[in-house]
Image (tube, helix red, strand yellow):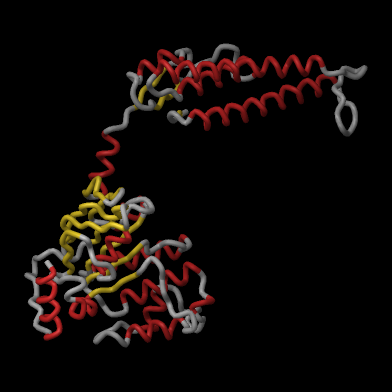
């Protein structure tokens, strides 16, 4: 492998690097490995990108997305595996490859003492046929900040300037590492439109993101990466249909107890339960109705194994059902004025108004407790 790299590097110095076939993939990755100590940031990654395609690498932070792009850009050497960009070795053929690609790094690295216009003109001078820097500043929405030094630009403005630097040389292939990070919604939409324009012009785009909607709207294909490995690779539509195919939905009457609902789940994963329309025992309001809603909500959040979680959720529902009664007992024991009102700051109130205030306060407290119980359970989703 090292011998081949040396031979390619010598060919690049002479300017006699053979061009790949027209139908060859723009990017080829096969068995790529990169480790830092005992941690494998990239662990046997493999994929290919067709010319003119927008390919997204989607995954959480630390999944190996940036490391993969840095290897393809020639900034890092892989420990094992194959990496080819436009048919060239990113490190051995760097001199021939650099004029043909554009790079938007995750960390911008812009010169802090230069203005936005000066930075773009500087990088435009590195290419034989660059785009007009002033027109490009208008395109990315930086016309008003053209004379602002980079150290005074906001985070979103720096990302837009980095995007302009990546495409100022009219590249055949653009690497975009989380291109919309730190951008406001308007700048994000403008960046998406610019990526679509690059695709229409035939430019290949390889981008990384941890935003699902961004990958779905921009990419022709998406590779989902986790811990340095590809766990799924397909079109956004196929990945979405596959996720929906594994979801289930069941509807049960409000009177069904927790054990029966967990049995519906078969002792497996979480089940989303809807509620049928109809009157509730004890009416919609009052302690009885609130307790019934608490039991119904807690009952909808059940997952296997039912023997353990069912008993725990049932106990919480019973405690929720008992709280309105305890609140009513406490209110009944409170001292009252001669007119039947409840003492409070600001003066006495009538008995009717005081009782209404106690019931309203108890209802608000019960709603807050039910929301807290629902967050603590975290075992499913209820659709009204």
| Side of 373 relative to 24 (left or right) | right
Question: Front-most of 303 and 335?
Answer: 303
Residue under the point 67% across and 25% down: 363
Residue under the point 57% across and 15% down: 318
- Relative to 32, say whether 14 is above or below: below
Q: Give the x, y percent position of residue 20.
A: 8, 71
- Relative to 21, say whether 150 is above or below: below
Q: Give the x, y percent position of residue 300.
A: 45, 23
* Residue found farthest to the right: 338
| Side of 365 relative to 305 (left or right) | right
| Side of 205 relative to 288 (left or right) | left
Question: Front-most of 280 and 245?
Answer: 245
| Side of 203 relative to 191 (left or right) | left
Residue under the point 81% across and 20% down: 352
Q: Which picture quadrant has residue 110?
A: bottom left
Q: Give the x, y percent position of residue 38.
A: 31, 52
Image quarter (top left, top right, bottom left or bottom right) of the N terminus:
bottom left
Question: Front-most of 342 and 158?
Answer: 158
- Relative to 158, say whether 300 is above or below: above
Question: Front-most of 3 and 19?
Answer: 3
* Residue found farthest to the front: 37
């Amino acid at each position: 492998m090292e011998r081949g790299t040396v031979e390619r590097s010598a060919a690049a110095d002479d300017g006699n690097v053979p061009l790949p076939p027209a139908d060859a993939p723009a990017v080829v990755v096969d068995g790529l490995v990169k480790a830092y100590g005992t941690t494998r940031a990239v662990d046997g990654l493999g994929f290919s990108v067709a010319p003119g395609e927008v390919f997204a690498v989607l995954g959480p932070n630390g999944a190996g997305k940036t490391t993969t792009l840095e290897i393809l850009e020639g900034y890092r050497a892989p420990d094992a595996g194959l990496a080819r960009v436009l048919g060239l070795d990113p490190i051995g053929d760097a001199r021939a490859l650099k004029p043909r690609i554009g790079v938007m790094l995750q960390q911008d690295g812009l010169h802090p003492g230069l203005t936005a216009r000066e930075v773009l003109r500087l990088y435009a001078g590195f290419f034989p046929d660059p785009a007009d820097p002033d027109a490009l500043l208008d395109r990315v929405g930086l016309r008003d900040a053209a004379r602002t030094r980079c150290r005074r630009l906001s985070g979103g403005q720096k990302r837009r300037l980095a995007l302009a630097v990546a495409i100022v040389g009219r590249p055949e292939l653009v690497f975009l590492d989380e291109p919309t990070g730190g951008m406001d919604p308007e700048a994000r939409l403008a960046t998406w439109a610019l990526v679509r324009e690059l695709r229409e012009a035939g430019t290949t785009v390889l981008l990384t993101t941890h935003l699902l909607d961004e990958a779905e709207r921009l990419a022709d294909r998406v590779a989902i990466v986790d811990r340095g490995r590809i766990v799924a690779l397909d079109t956004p539509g196929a990945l979405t249909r596959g996720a929906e195919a594994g979801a289930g939905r069941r509807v049960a009457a409000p009177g069904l107890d927790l054990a029966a609902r967990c049995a519906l789940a078969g002792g497996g994963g979480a089940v989303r339960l809807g509620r049928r329309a109809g009157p509730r025992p004890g009416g919609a309001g009052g302690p009885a109705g609130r307790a019934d809603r608490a039991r119904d909500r807690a009952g909808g959040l059940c997952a296997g194994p039912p023997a353990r979680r069912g008993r725990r959720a049932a106990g919480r529902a019973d405690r929720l059902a008992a709280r309105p009664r305890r609140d009513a007992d406490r209110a009944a024991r409170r001292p009252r004025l001669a007119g039947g009102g409840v003492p409070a700051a600001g003066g006495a109130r009538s008995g009717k108004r005081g009782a209404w205030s106690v019931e309203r306060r108890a209802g608000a407290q019960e709603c807050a407790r039910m929301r807290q119980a629902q967050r603590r359970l975290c075992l499913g989703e209820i659709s009204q």
